[in-house]
Image (tube, grey):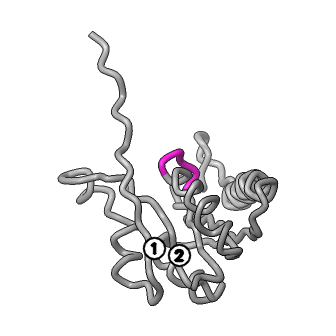
Amino acid sequence: MYERVLIPLDGSEVAESILPFAEKVAGPLDAEVVLLRVVEPVSPVEAMGAAGVAIPDTLFLRELAAKDYLTALAKGLETKGLRVRTALRVGTPAAEIVAAAADEKADLIAMTTHGRSGFRRVLFGSVAESVLRSAEVPVLMMRMAVKAAPVEG
């Protein structure tokens, strides 16, 4: 059965909606849960401040925030009796998720998809679809619709 489940998270509520799976499935199986956050590299535009001054710590600050985020989620799952580790990687999300699954020796990748379609999917791409196509282990994917912003009128 599954001994190690990799759960990629992007910081969104949609991504976190996979966590009850960890509680209900990985917990009773005593599978270890590896929470993964991929931080994308800093673009040249982001590396420059509003005044055109280089901000060298942008990536470091992102990594620090990602570590804090993962630690908080891991503690919450640990209080429910799950075995949890965290992993942080820098790079392109889909490629890093697949690489992390191999490096962590995961038996399963469990993740959500934002449920984008049409133009939004073309514009933003689909990390989940790329993972599904290139992963060498099973991928459990839950489709979660992005909440629409209320229309004011």
Quarter containing the C terminus:
top left
11 in magenta = yes
Q: Which residues are magenta?
A: 10-14
SS assignment at label 2: helix
Marks 2 and 1: CB-CB under 8 Å? yes
Residue 136, quarter of the rendered image:
bottom left
Which residue was labeled with disc 1?
Answer: 94
Left or right? Give the position of 81 relative to 13.
right
Left or right? Give the position of 43 relative to 123.
right
Which residue was labeled with disc 2?
Answer: 97
Camera-side residue of 116 and 77: 77
Q: Where in the figure is residue 149, as x and y percent of width and height?
A: 36, 28
Residue furthest to the left: 118
Q: Residue at x 55, y 60 (%)?
A: 21
7 in magenta = no
Q: Is residue 56 visible?
A: no
